[in-house]
Structures are given as structure tokens and as C-alpha cells.
Amino acid sequence: MKSTMLREVAISIGMVIAILSGLWAYTGSWPPLVVVESNSMIHSEQGQVGSIDAGDLVLVKSPGRTDQIVTYVESMQEGNQYSGHQSHGMPGDVIIYQKNGGTDTPVIHRAILKAVRNETGGWDVPGTDIRAVEEISLIIDYPCYPHGGSLRIDRWVPAHEGYLTTGDNEKSNGCRLDQLRATDRNASDQYIRSQGLKDQDGNPVLAVKDEWVIGVASTEIPWLGSIKLLTTGAWPAVPNQSWTKLSMVIGVILVAPVIVDAIRGRSKESGKQYGDKHQGEDE
């Protein structure tokens, strides 16, 4: 019996290693999965499959495994080669990045646009008509609250090339970006520090450099990460329906072996009765 138990444990460990190795080979990043801890990306307060909710697991594909990080404005521009590109329920890619290149908990948010240096000076914004400008001003048709779908970039002067990002939750994020200075040129430093997204040292988050991008959000595995959030204290962010669906999944996992064993037992019993019957006939 002891050898049987050891064999089952070895098989289980081998399966876990095989799955993680396969995910690493597919994503090119380690760890290949992240657990979403906040509701900044939800599309519905009840949660939904297809968007990124707190408690979801998300595969993280290495930037080197993607041809291009497609921004929201590139996806929205008609005639663009990336026009119509969608990821997790909205245009553009969702990226996972380190705030200002730090080592604290990464952020998983959508790439709205990218400021790129023009060879002749100034800044370009791929996916728009903006070329070689000293300040970037732009109104984006983006679903946000309370301004009815107008995300405004206000005379933003980038400190360096990089992405402007925000979460999909239009109510909690409002019509503003992680890089709050880009949406309000006249905001005071005190306001930016108190209201905007900050890094581990308390500094406002700047445009996301390419080297700060850990990966691009790939396949979503709903609900399963909620178990981890029970141990971190972040569980209140998980939508109620996610707990319900997770309970159903766990119930199926627990009940399935019982059903399989019952079916096997009936099959063996039927086979035994069939054998006894024919043995009696032979005698």
C-alpha cells in the first residue's frame, strides 16, 4: 500500500511539472501565470468570462513571443494593420509591467497608446496622426466614467518613450490613466502623488518603458486564482458570482472521482455476473 501511495504522489508531482513546463514553453516567461488581485480590469461588477476579474489566472506571454504590443488607439484606427485587434473584451493588448521598473507587485492594465521619438525631434503616437510634436494632446473614444467615453490626453510631455496604460473598469479608474500627469497638465504635484498610481517608493508612475514590460496577457483561466486571494486578504475584490462558479468547479472535481468509481464498480459487477452465469452454463 505504501508503494502505491508513493507511486500516486510521484505521478501527481510529475503531472504538475509537465503542466508547468508546457506553460513555460508556450509563454516563454516564468512564472507563466499571474493571479489578478484587484478589480481594476473588470467589465461587470458580477464578473464575466472573457474579461479579467479579480481571482482569475492569466497566462503571461513573454514580449519576445509576440510580434507587436498593439495599443488601444492602433486597434481603433481605421485602415491600420492592427485595426479591430481585441484582447480580453476590448481593443488593444493588456500588458503586465513593473511600475517605474521596480520590484513591487506588477500591474496588469491595457496599453492605450505609445509615445515614440521621431527621428527629426518630438514625439509620434502610432495609431494616430500625431507626428513630431513637442506636447501630446489627444481625445480618445474610450469607454470611461463620468465623461461619456472621452479619455483626454492634455499637453503631455513624455519623459521617455513608453506606454500610457489604464484598467478597463470605467467606474473605478474614471477617465484617467495610470500616468495621471498625462490626463491633467495643470494638476498639482500633491494631487498627482495622492491620487495617481505610485511605485514602491511613492513616486508617480511614468510611461511604461519596453524593458519594464514583463509580458502580454494571454489566455484567461477564470476563478481558480481566488483560492490564493483568501490567503492574501485580497478576496473582497473577487466578484460574488466568481465564488459561486468556483464552488461549482470544486464540487465537480470532488464528485467526479466518486461517479467514476461507481461506474467502474457497476461494470466490474456486471462482468462478474456475466462470468458466473456462463460458468454455470458450462458446468
Image (cartoon, grey):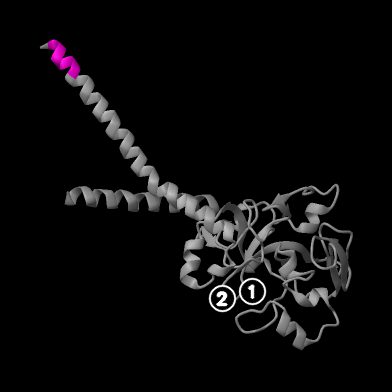
Residue 29 to residue 277: above or below: below
Secondary structure predominantly adopted by residues drawn in magenta: helix
The answer to which quarter of the image holds residue 237 is bottom right
Given residues 79 and 3, the one toward you in this image is 3
CA gap, disc 1 and disc 2: 8 Å
Q: Position of residue 114 (x, y in %)?
A: 77, 64
Mark 1 or mark 2, earlier in chain: 1
Q: Secondary structure at mark 2?
A: loop
Say whether residue 263 is left or right of residue 49: left
Residue found 21% across the figure and 25% down from its top: 272
Q: Position of residue 218 (x, y in %)?
A: 60, 53
Residue found 66% across the figure and 79% down from its top: 198
* In magenta segment, residue 278: yes
Label 2 sits on residue: 104
Asked if disc 1 and disc 2 are in contact, CB closer than 8 Å, the reply is yes
Say whether residue 94 is left or right of residue 3: right
Three-letter amino acid code of the residue under disc 1: Lys
User: Which quadrant of the rendered structure holds the C terminus?
Assistant: top left
Q: Residues within 10 Å of mark 2 (few under 14, many from 20)?
A: few
